[in-house]
Amino acid sequence: EAQVTQNPRYLITVTGKKLTVTCSQNMNHEYMSWYRQDPGLGLRQIYYSMNVEVTDKGDVPEGYKVSRKEKRNFPLILESPSPNQTSLYFCASSSSAPHRGYTFGSGTRLTVV
Amino acid sequence: KQEVTQIPAALSVPEGENLVLNCSFTDSAIYNLQWFRQDPGKGLTSLLLIQSSQREQTSGRLNASLDKSSGRSTLYIAASQPGDSATYLCAVDNQAGTALIFGKGTTLSVSS
């Protein structure tokens, strides 16, 4: 089944403790991206990657890092999480063709205390 | 900068009613428009994708239309059911093709 898989689904952590949220897709998509969703603010892009070793900032990149060493994986790294990073996070992927649709993962609910 | 607006923000209807959700965007230079469904605290499920050269797409009881020139899309849901209760999100590609720009969504409640 074609899908984007995120792990973990739920995570509670403490301020300053480094964490990684994994994202993997099995559709051989070139493009991958991370979004966060917050009440009243909607979905906002954090980082994206057009292909292996090619990453760039989205609208809200502060406090996050990403890497794209393999085509299928695009982990999101919070090196020193803070409470304002408490959010629902989504990974998405798409082919690089112009008229493409996006497939989203099931989401990771992160709470930073 | 592309902005996407969805009206209404919330909608309550009785079961069986036909309904229309609206989406407008400020920049007509888009690749695609995609409608998603989101259940509370859950992921995004793609419902319909309309390419910029298309006028509409249909899937079962759902029909989405696109009018690029006026910057509008509608999602028509026929014969609504309680299981349709969810938040519906409209999203368009940005001009660079590097991001989806989302509206804030319409939360639909269908009562039996």
Image (spheres, coloured by chain):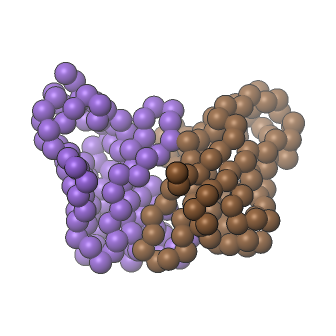
* B77 relative position to A103: left or right: left
Residue situated in front as seen by the camera: A18 or A81: A18
Residue situated in front as seen by the camera: B55 or B29: B55
Q: Residue at x 74, y 53 (%)?
A: A75
> What count of labels does the image hold?
0
Q: Which image quarter is the C terminus of chain B in?
A: top left
Q: Does any portion of residue A64 appear in the rendered image?
A: no
Q: Residue at x 31, y 60 (%)?
A: B24
| Residue A95: % across, % down | 54, 70
The chain displayed purple equals B
Is residue A112 shown above or below A28? above
Q: Quadrant location of residue B35?
A: bottom left
Q: Residue at x 42, y 35 (%)?
A: B39
Is residue A8 shown above or below A50? above
**What shade does chain A have?**
brown
Q: Residue furthest front?
A: A1
* B35 relative position to A65: left or right: left
| Residue A24: % across, % down | 67, 53
Q: Does any portion of residue B24 appear in the rendered image?
A: yes
Q: Residue at x 73, y 45 (%)?
A: A21
Is residue A16 shown above or below A50? above
